[in-house]
Image: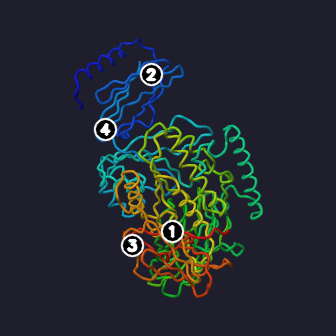
Amino acid sequence: MTYCKDISYCLKKTSYLLAFWLLPFGISAQTFEVAKIFSDHMVLQRDANIPVWGEAASSSNISVFFNGKEFKTKASPKGNWEVTLPKLPAGGPYEMSIVSNTTTVDFTDIMIGDVWLCSGQSNMEWVVANSNNSELEIKNGNHPNIRHFKVPHSSASFPEDKLADGEWETASSETLGNFTAVGYFFAREIQKSENVPIGLLNSSWGGSRIEPWIRAEDLGFDDPEEMAAQLEAKIAAEKAEFIAQLKEKLSTIPEEDLGMKNEDALWAKKNYDDSQWEAMELPSLWEERGWENTDGIFWFRKTILLPKGVTASDGILSLGAIDDNDQTWVNGHLVGSTNAYNENRVYEVPSKYLREGKNTITVRVDDTGGGGGIYGDSGLMFFEANKVKTALHGDWKYKVGMINMNAAVQGANQQPTLLYNKMIHPILRFPIKGALWYQGESNAGNAVDAKTYTTHFKTLISSWRTLWNVGDFPFLYVQLANFMAAEDHPGPSNWALLRESQSNALELPYTGQAVIIDIGEANDIHPRNKQDVGKRLALAAQKMAYNKEVVYSGPQLNKTDSSNSKITLHFDHIGSGLVTKDNGPLKGFAIAGADKKFVWAEAKIEGNTIEVWSPDVASPVAVRYAWADNPDKANLYNKEGLPASPFRTDNWEE
């Protein structure tokens, strides 16, 4: 139940409503609409003028009642209306009523606080329910002053003013599981230090490249229609190239699963002859084994030998993670299936399905988009029965069952400007405190894309700041985590190039970078530890947004000095001093002479500098640190526990 604190205000509102209720019937209420960004439980940006907007019948009168005041306007001839609410400090809850000639819309439980845009690809979209300690986090997740709005996946060829849908939700044990994990753990940290309501405006899309999030004009397309025509031609060319590549590998392109007929798994039968199938080393995504951009169904088979006595007891079949869905058979018997790409597969195998000697495991993998295959930890691939464990990693036989031809054309989350048009443009009038960004994996597939990211990233930041028109708001982002197998020798790395491009954005004012090369997972592009990601972003926010004197970054290379046999490195953000995380010798450094051949280097902390050398390089000219997809040995930190950012002192071609 609500009550009126201001009698004159409420009488005025009541008389206003009564007059509208007495209007003649027949006036359509369907023409009145408030922008979907406004709903119960919303957070509005403190200390900022707040536009409230929508659509109504042409020239109709609109009144917004908020905080004891009435704000009047009239819809334009085209039916657009907007009022601006004055600045308010953090607080609440408030109520809002919006009244037109025909309709009243009421919003309750409105808080004034800080709104943070959360954008990027799947690691930003990744939800609390799939993160570390999710059950405990959700159980303890009642934070009524943390609110979340998820912008639905949507796209458009030209900028549109309306969101597809969405509503604000309050963090609770019932809702928290579907919040952006990075955003939530960030908000939780900020609330500890700032004690203000936090709104998370989550506009993210898994697998998206950076180009879809940038306005057409800022990508160099002054004419959106011209861009649309070029995009159509690009899509047609990509499809033709994709089909040509498939035809080189397959005599015919199967668009229905050849291995399954009327739910009968032909290729899973225990006596099926797979001798003509090709081999693929697992675990890995099949995109890494020559099947780039391929979605569909692949079948995998492996035969193992079980010694006498093992088959007397039930067994456990463990396959690790599979992207996306699987059905699994042993000797022709279905033992399990899972429809989730982020779960480790563990299936019980009854002893009656086993036999002494040869046993065949068949896995049907259905990939609906992005990476596909049996890709988890090799240590999780095994069969065990009667305390005898058989490793399953290594070569498996495989055959393509079906190709999803929709993959021949990249989705909207891959195409320039399409996500900006529908997921960013409609919210530009909604004031924000700052932005959190976690994206880049989809642009790290080759060296050209990884280097071009420097320009695109700076363009996105500058463009969004201009379009939001709230000044150079803090833009805080996550550098790519460590991922994939660690290399034994120094070498080129597209992921390292992408990280370098991300670091280059620090040249722009009020930017902050969370380095997480120490909390990724070699076999999973989606690290579950989103808590530390949120904490490191929050440190940057405390500095950039809240003017706190905190150490918010790990060491960053500033300059170098060279002697005949050593290179000395100087750093910013050393905090209380340089250390190694494990208190052991420095690792992760490589050094090269003029021949550009890198070798692992010796390195030593000398006060606030580091000396790097190698007995194999008499006259060093370049140093690299943590320059790898997975720099698992890198251990340089400051005493505050923040890892050093990867770097190189050369600009040689990879």
Real-space Cα distance between discs 3 and 2?
Answer: 65 Å
Q: In this view, does 423 lie above or below 7?
A: below
Real-space Cα distance between discs 2 and 1?
Answer: 61 Å
Which quarter of the rendered picture does the C terminus lie within?
Answer: bottom right
Q: In this view, does 418 lie above or below 365?
A: above
Question: In the picture, residue 107 is in which quadrant?
Answer: top left
Residue 621: x percent and y percent?
62, 77
Which residue is tagged 2? 29
Which residue is tagged 4? 109
Residue at the image position 45 percent from the left and 47 percent from the top: 473
For numbered disc 3, what is the local secondary structure? Answer: loop
Q: Do the residues labelled 4 and 1 touch (CB within 8 Å)?
A: no
Left or right: where 214 falls relative to 151: right
For numbered disc 1, what is the local secondary structure? Answer: strand
For numbered disc 4, what is the local secondary structure? Answer: strand
Tell me the amino acid under the disc marked 3.
Answer: Gly
